[in-house]
Amino acid sequence: MVKVKSMQIRRMQKELLIKENTNYFQSCHASTVVKLSNDDLLVAFFAGTKEGTGDTAIWLSRKTKNGWEEPKRVVFGVGIPHWNPSLFYQNNKIWLFYKTGFDVHSWITRYVTSEDNAETWSVSKELVPLDPSPRGPVKNKVILLSNGAWLAPGSVEEKRSWDAFTDYSSNQGLTWKKSDLVKFNHQLGTPLEERNLWEGLVGNALWENDLSKVSNWDGIIQPSLWESQEGLVHMMCRSTRGYIYRSDSIDFGKTWCESYPTSLPNNNSGIDVVKMENGILALVYNPVSGNWSARTPLTISFSEDNGITWTDHYHLETESGEFSYPAIITEGNELFITYTVNRNNIAFSHLKVSN
């Protein structure tokens, strides 16, 4: 048991999903996790030769009482890259959202569903037909609001600007209504050409490994959501500005205030947050400031005041390399976390927390 300020943290498990000496794929990334009513855990991620290549597909791993089963390829298409799955489990039905497209600027959101605990899946469909923009969840989980609606954390990456939004569904995913883009002042901060755009990124970690591409991007993406009180919803976002950005809503995520920086560092990499049953927030992130900075260490911090202040770091990983794109869910006082390990494996951590 480790004490971090008022939190007592016990790490129950740390496991790698992909066994040594297997050759399912060369690269994997961007995991998502849900817990089923039979206590199985499902983890989805994209994998293939490399991020953005035509053989990348959505894969699924299952953890039963007997351990992790071999991963299975569940969604794929010849020559079409697949990206960023997001799992959601509601009323004994699993939703698996994901992106397709040859690059981030051309993403379309699709989904499949399962009503037999992921034994079989429906035919793939577009989430919002005829909409060319990437709708629904872009990386992190959909949340169930206190009014019964679903709220999906979305974002769009244009040639120069990154912007966040939410998608609201009042009819269990049949239709979605997109919020306006969260306001972000793209004119503030250090001029893009003066920033250290590539500091600390090790090896061929990103598909966007052409500096001329990424040097123009500025803004916030990949929000993670929670509801603090009825109708009061909040998001925390990855940013290019060296800090996690936040926005707040008073109408169930239909409209949002202008985004603002928090005190939490961000390396322009994915984060995820969850509200535990006792109201405490748990945030998983790389506590590194800078644009395209190192993706290690990987840390969890807690907040007892709705994200105003945070505990010291409890490190999940401290070695050099890439530990990134975490996903986190909760049940009672337990946390279930997955994340990328050096683009060749997905790690699972199970924590028990008390205060």
Image (cartoon, rainbow, N blue to C red):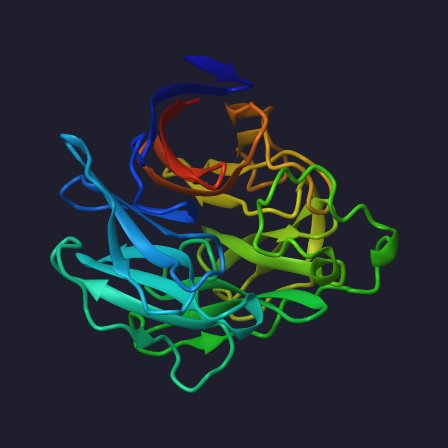
Q: Is residue 249 left or right of residue 80?
A: right
> Going 32% across and 69% down the picture, which residue do you hit?
77
Observer-nearest of 267 and 220: 267
**Residue reaching furthest to the top:** 1
Whether residue 44 appears in this view of the structure is yes
Tell me residue 144's x, y (percent).
Answer: 35, 58
Which of the 4 quarters of the picture holds residue 189? bottom right
Tell me residue 110's x, y (percent).
Answer: 36, 71
Q: Is residue 235 above or below residue 79?
A: above
**Which quarter of the figure is the N terminus placed in?**
top left
Whether residue 191 appears in this view of the structure is no
Count all numbered tags in the image, as a single digit.
Answer: 0
Tell me residue 205's x, y (percent).
Answer: 57, 45
> Going 88% across and 52% down the picture, which residue do you hit?
194
Which of the 4 quarters of the picture holds residue 136? bottom left
Observer-nearest of 257 and 101: 101
Tell me residue 203's x, y (percent).
Answer: 61, 40
Q: Is residue 310 above or below residue 37?
A: above
**Which quarter of the figure is the C terminus placed in?**
top left
